[in-house]
Amino acid sequence: MRQSSSAANLHENLLARLAVLCVTVCNVMNRNTAPSHDLADLGELEGDVLLIIWRRGPVTADQVREALERPLKDSTVRTVLRRLEEKGYLVHSVDDRRTFIYRSAESRQRVAARAAKRIVDWFCEGSVETMLVGMVDSKVLDRSELQRLADYIAAAQQADPSTEKEAQ
């Protein structure tokens, strides 16, 4: 299904907000809710590096170091990249000059969706509705975003009627 530009922007905006919400909320948890790494396991620098790679696409360690808003040693940046790779967030290839090129292992949207699912499962007993009501009550989502989200859902249901849940 092709998304309109505004629907895609809304989708990305919501997922980014959910990822931030997950990092904020999940930091109080004592354990991961799934065997894979959780965004809450990331330190501030790791999160900054991951955001750079999601925004820019494939990068070298030098490009990451230059994009960071603080001076860091080359070895520090390479250690962070290696740790993100060990956690499954990044993969690398080697170019003809033996330079490591890092890219994300998964899209930002997929990681954010997984984080949102953990929030829904952990705090809302699996109810997306409960989470969305909480986001509305907390003024995370405003009326216009809710309308765009409703339009996006309606378009998705028209394109694929199997996505519509039966009334409970």
Image: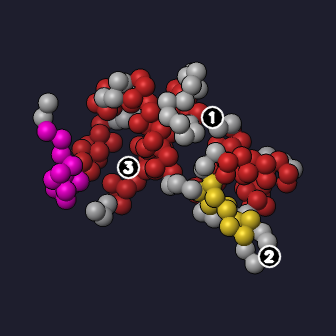
Q: Nearer the viewer, mark 3 or mark 1?
A: 1
Name the residue at 46% across, 49% down. Answer: 110
Closer mark to the observer between disc 2 and disc 3: 2
Query: Between disc 2 and disc 3, whose residue precedes?
Result: 3
Q: Amino acid at mark 2?
A: Arg
Q: Verify CB contact (< 8 Å) between mark 3 and mark 1.
A: no
Q: Left or right: where does residue 111 sit relative to residue 89? A: left
Q: Position of residue 105 (x, y in %)?
A: 57, 56
Among numbered discs 3 and 1, the one appearing first in the sequence:
3
Q: Which residues are magenta?
A: 155-166
- The kind of secondary structure the magenta stretch mainly shows is helix
Front residue of this view, candidates 3 and 22:
22
Look at 19% across and 56% down and name the residue there: 160
Q: Are marks 2 and 3 in contact (CB under 8 Å)?
A: no
Checking the image for residue 10, the label placed there is 3
Q: Residue furthest front?
A: 35
For residue 12, side relative to residue 45 (left or right): left
Number of callouts in the render? 3
Q: Which mark is residue 97?
A: 2
Q: Is residue 158 magenta?
A: yes
Amino acid identity at mark 1: Asp
Label 3 amino acid?
Leu
Q: Which residue is mark 1?
A: 41
Residue 65 position, x and y percent, is 77, 55
User: Which mark sits nearer the N-terminus, 1 or 2?
Assistant: 1
Q: Residue 96, relative to residue 111: is it above or below?
A: below
Q: Residue at x 49, y 30 (%)?
A: 33
